[in-house]
Amino acid sequence: MKTIEFKQLDETLYYEKLENGLDVYILPKKGFSKTFVTFTTKYGSVDRTFVPIGETESVTVPDGIAHFLEHKMFEKEDGDVFQKFSEYGASANAFTSFTRTAYLFSSTDNIYKSTETLLNFVQEPYFTEATVNKEKGIIGQEITMYDDQPDWRLYFGTIENMYHSHPVKIDIAGTIGSIDGITADHLYTCYHTFYHPSNMLLFAIGAVDPEEMMAFIRENQGKKEFPEPTPIQRFFDEEPTEVAVKERTLHMDVQKPKLYIGLKAKQTGLSGRDMLKHELSVQIALELIFGRTSNFYERIYDEGLIDESYAFDFTLENGFGFAMIGSDTTEPVALEQAIKAELAKYEGNAQFASNDLERIKRKKIGFFLRALNSIEFIANQFTRYSFNDMNLFDVLPVLEELTIEDLTTAFATVQGESQQTVFKVLPTEKGEQ
Amino acid sequence: MFKTIPFAKGVNLHIRQTTQFKTVNFSIKWRRPLTAESASERTVLTNVLQHSNAKYTTTAAFRSFLDDLYGTVLYFDTSKRGNEHTVLMNVEAVNDQYLANTSVLNEVLGLLHTAIFEPNLENGVFKESIVAREKKMVIQRIESIFDDKSRFAQQRLQQMLRPNEPASISANGTVEAIDNITVASLFAAYESMLANDKIDIYVAGDIDEDEIVAKLKQALPFKDRTPDEIPAILPQKHPQQDYVREQHDMKQGKLHIGFSTPVRFGDADFAKMQIFNGVFGGYPHAKLFMNVREKESLAYYASSSYASHYGLLFVVSGIEPKNEEKALSLIKEQLAVMQAGDISALELEQTKAMLTNQLKESLDSARGQIEIYDQYKDLPEEFSVETWANKWRAVTKDDVIEMAKQVQLEAVYFLCGKEQAAQ
């Protein structure tokens, strides 16, 4: 077991790569009564075309399968795993993103029993045609629920506009039509390919003894047999730099129009510290241009073009990335023009002031230190960073060394005119369905 | 958990010294009786105070100052509990020890004074342009509920159950009452809040107790006051309509059901009622999740929540519109089987373990410590996790059957798409 100390933050991280390839991280937190454990596979909604383990030809599986698999992991021959966690007083959950599927629990008691339950239920698949078909009604209602949420439709509509072929444009849960075609065999194929321990990471944090917990996990894993790990081959079509669709509108039952401008990122092949630096640079550039201390924000707020829903964000993963800026607005045309005009000012020669940069750095440092109070934040973010060969605890030193040039260079990769798209959700007109 | 120090008449300071967090948390709560008018005024007021003040007269200037203080978080909000309306101001600043050579804490204490006692005025009242814009912002916040079908359906159910009562009045107020606000009425509400409200001040973090008390006395010069009595909880009554269906342009059906219970927060049977709710629909092991979702695949979510201050219990589920009757009868059936005594020892144990764990977990954040303590502090016995764990442990199957028998269905609200509405 390795020990990694972060002196400035007063944190010590314990790490071991087990014989079966599983990465295990443990971070004890003083004063906490709960423990939070996440068990995550590097497998999400974008992994739809791949070579199944032990085979040579690639396959394409139905959309929404990673999320479907996440649901089905909880059902076993002897019942529902939630029952067991409840018995131990543990709150369990799971989520599927574009690139990860995570299983997790938090609890103040029976930590080892819950950890054992977590490890075992994720590593003992049980799928039958009957249980798979039963789940289709439940996930069908989950998809329908999201279909009725205008903010979700706005977010996904903007992503769909940006991408020609990359599967990030496909809703994580799939569609009612696509999940209908999912079989138990599909689930086993995806499971065996992506749930190998060498493609997974376990993070335990909180009221936990690192030596004891590591020994416990080591023993649990030592008793199980897995095939030799092989590198997973995933396939993605070539994705052009420019957006697929420049502008689209969806009519829904809303009172007020909603608008997002999406900026498609062209620098998506980075990993490690370069990726961290790039990601932080774009985020800070956006903050300087569109944040609450910017002239732009003050102006459009005063002009009544935005309300409290105004937001901007930058997402970056291997193979795709995008920034979004938008708000609910009574004047979608004026807001679109204002955002585009602001972006145009930075075209080619983004000018950032160094005192502004220093201020936003301080803000980000404060945000980061605050976030370290949350053991959920640390476990989830650490895993995401790790899957991209980044280290969460490098955020502080990398922030401190950022320069104006870093911001200018990074921002140039998201702001070409051909990389911009607009998506609007407008109220259904009278008499229209 | 917190040490309470009288600050002025009607104002209490609650302090918790702890090294658990990397930040220091302040929370100030102003309380008065809840009405639609006062909720409206006080919500607009929080927006105005958050926008700017006499020292930092624009949002950009105010936010820049906060960013410079290592992203110190400052926000105002409103909430309600029973018949009481609360304005709260939360401030969270990084603990000095994690920063090289800076003292954020003293600046933050000055900031508390500025944000509360030095408003951005013109001719002795708030600025017309700021008030007009923030009124619009709050109105838009209230109206945005229409776009969120779950929240909309829940609001409609509450209005059916308890029209024009605190149980259905939003902590944000109403559009009509906000329209009536003037700069003068808003400034009067502000002065009254500072002078007359019952106030609780919370501090949690790695602080020196004597030092922080002395500094807070300077930063927050609240005077003695005799706060308005919060009216007693209203008696239960039956709604005029017990089944309402409405249509929006949407796909899913939102089934929201209201029940009443005579048991309220702090009553002798309160712990028993919490266990009832847990077994009925509070958790993934509960009857609603296991039957409506897992067994019948009717829904993605099906759960219950206990609004203990109002003696109400809500069940919510998102279903295919054609399954309205089937889901409703299945939900009713879960209550009936509990009334008939179908409650297993395992269900009881699971629920007790979950309630205890949840309470312990919520104490792992400063915000959680403040909110839990704030809720339980007015009960006669001193708050501790063990006290509550023991109360839950003592609850028997017969107790839960007894609780189930007192739960009554009051009203059903169903929202679904236009062309799919049931006949």
Image (cartoon, coloured by chain):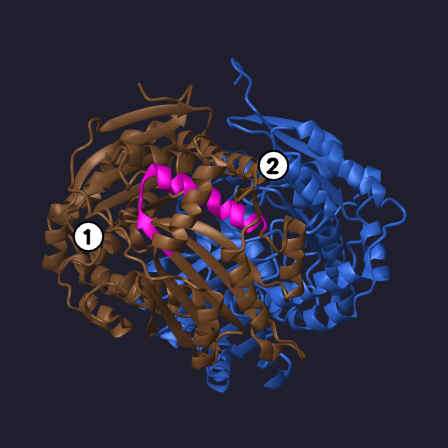
Chain colours: A blue, B brown
Q: Report the front residue among B338 and A207.
A: A207
In this picture, which residue range is highlighted in magenta? B30-52
To which residue does mark 2 refer?
A: A154
Amino acid at pointer 1: Arg
Q: How many numbered marks does the figure carry?
A: 2
**Circle 1 crowding by C-alpha within 10 Å: few under 14, some 14–19, many from 20:** many
Residue A185 in sight from this viewpoint: no
User: Going by the image, does B13 lie left or right of A406?
Assistant: left
Which quarter of the rendering shows the N terminus of chain B?
Answer: bottom left
**B47 inside magenta stretch:** yes
Identify the residue at the far right of this view: A348
Q: Is residue B39 magenta?
A: yes
Above-or-below relation of B257 to B80: above
Please tell me whether mark 2 or mark 1 is closer to you in this view: 1
Question: What is the chief secondary structure element of the magenta stretch?
Answer: helix
Residue name at image x 13 percent, y 63 percent: B396
Q: Chain of mark 2?
A: A
Find residue B365 and report its image quarter: bottom left
Q: Is label 1 in a helix, a strand or a loop? A: loop
Q: Can residue B69 be seen at all in this image of the molecule? A: yes
In front of the other: A154 or A118: A154
Kindly state the secondary structure of the residue where label 2 is placed: helix
Q: Whole-percent x and y of residue B376? A: 27, 63
The disc placed on residue B264 is 1
